[in-house]
Amino acid sequence: MYIGKRKHDKFRYWKLVVDLTTITLGAIVIFLVMYVAFLVEERMKWLPAVFLGAALVNLIESFKKMYYGKYLAGLTFMLMAIVIAAIAIVSYLSIWNVL
């Protein structure tokens, strides 16, 4: 006999929330790319924010893939998120002359 709720029934619309978060972050990253490429005179200082946004989108997608049991795809997305975050850190250090 089944007593209680399943683990996945606690919040029914979590998939929609994750997808909307990913779409929103992707749109923000695209806006930042347009901002950096065309609109700002000192545009290079915003480049690390673009990389960090892309890394965050990849990280969210990696957790989503791993949740669905696609571990290889999830690990690939996570590895790419780490690489992009490292590029963001290096670009921040070189652009803002922290080194």
Image (spheres, rainbow, N blue to C red):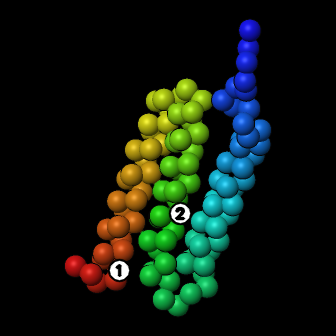
Q: Which residue is drawn at 30% across and 75% down?
A: 93
Q: Is residue 83 left or right of residue 18?
A: left
Q: Residue at x 44, y 82 (%)?
A: 45
Instruction: Say what amino acid the circle numbered 2 marks.
Output: Gly
Q: Dot 2 corresponds to which residue? A: 53
SS of the residue under disc 1: helix
Given this view, does label 1 or label 2 mark the residue nearer the observer? 2
Q: Residues within 10 Å of mark 1 (few under 14, many from 20)?
A: some
Whether residue 30 is visible: no
Mark pair 1, 2: CA separation? 17 Å
For this rendering, which residue is in front, 81 or 9? 9
Q: Is residue 34 left or right of residue 45?
A: right
Q: Which residue lies furthest to the left in this view?
A: 99
Instruction: Say what amino acid the circle numbered 1 marks.
Output: Ile
In which quadrant will I find the C terminus? bottom left
Q: Which residue is drawn at 73% across and 26% down?
A: 5
Q: Which residue is drawn at 73% across and 18% down?
A: 3
Mark with earlier residue (1, 2)? 2
Q: Residue furthest bottom?
A: 41
Q: In this view, does 88 lie to the left or right of 32?
A: left
Horizontal and vertical percent position of residue 50: 51, 68
Quarter of the image for residue 69 reads top right
Q: Which mark is drawn over residue 95? A: 1
Above-or-below relation of 9 to 57 = above
Horizontal and vertical percent position of residue 12: 77, 38
For this rendering, which residue is in front, 13 or 98? 13
